[in-house]
Image (cartoon, helix red, strand yellow):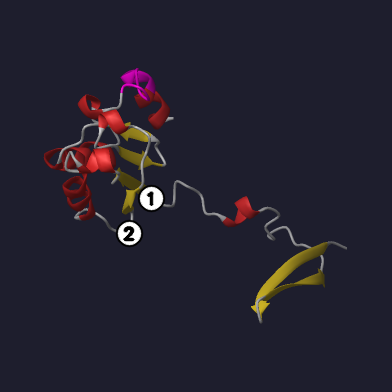
Amino acid sequence: MCYVRSYLVFSSNDQTKRLALMIKQPLSANTPRLMGDLIPDSAATPKRQFIQVCQYRSCRRFQSAAVLAAFKQYAGADLMVSASSCLGQCGSGPTVRVAPDNVWYCRVLPQDVATVIEQHIHQGKPVKRLLHPRFHPDYQRLLDRLQS
C-alpha cells in the first residue's frame, strides 16, 4: 500500500496552520509520481516568452519607456512584457532580456522592437546587431543553444 501526503495551508487570525492529510490508497499506473508528470509535454504546449525592459535611470535617458510601450503592443497569451528594475547593464541601455531563452539585447530603440518581435519571437532567431556582446560573444553558439 502506498501513502500520498498532501498539505493544506490556510491562514486564520494571522496564524498559518498546516494540515497534513494521509490518503491510504494504492497508486495506479496512471497516477503521477512527480510534479513533472503533471506538466504537459513541451511539444504540445506553446512556448510562452517573457520580455523585460529595464526602466532604471540610465536606460530611461535613452527612451526605454518608449521601447517598453512598443513591446507592450505585442503582448498576448504567449508573450508577456514587463518593466524591470536595473538589469545591471547601465552602460548599454536600454537593455532588454528575453526569457526563457535568456537572450540579452542592448541599445534597443523603439524602431527595433518590430524586428525583435518578428525575427526572435516569431522566427526563433535572435537579432544579431542588437545582441549584448558581454552575454553573447558567439552568435552561432547562441543559435545552436536555442535550437537544441
The residue carrying mark 2 is 77
The residue carrying mark 1 is 48
Can you say whether 16 is above or below 102 in the image?
A: below
| Quadrant (top left, top right, bottom left, bottom right) of the C terminus | top left
The total number of labels drawn is: 2
Residue 22 location, x and y as percent?
Answer: 82, 70
Q: Residue at x 22, y 36 (%)?
A: 119
Magenta residues, as a range? 133-141
Q: Residues within 10 Å of mark 2 (few under 14, many from 20)?
A: few
Q: Residues within 10 Å of mark 1 (few under 14, many from 20)?
A: few
Can you say whether 116 is above or below 32 in the image?
A: above
Seen as rendered, the residue at the extreme right is 1
Kindly report the secondary structure that dominates the magenta region of the rendered protein: loop
Any part of residue 126 in sight = no
Lower sequence index among marks 1 and 2? 1
Callouts 1 and 2 close, C-beta under 8 Å: yes
Q: Secondary structure at mark 1?
A: loop
Residue 122 location, x and y as percent?
Answer: 25, 42
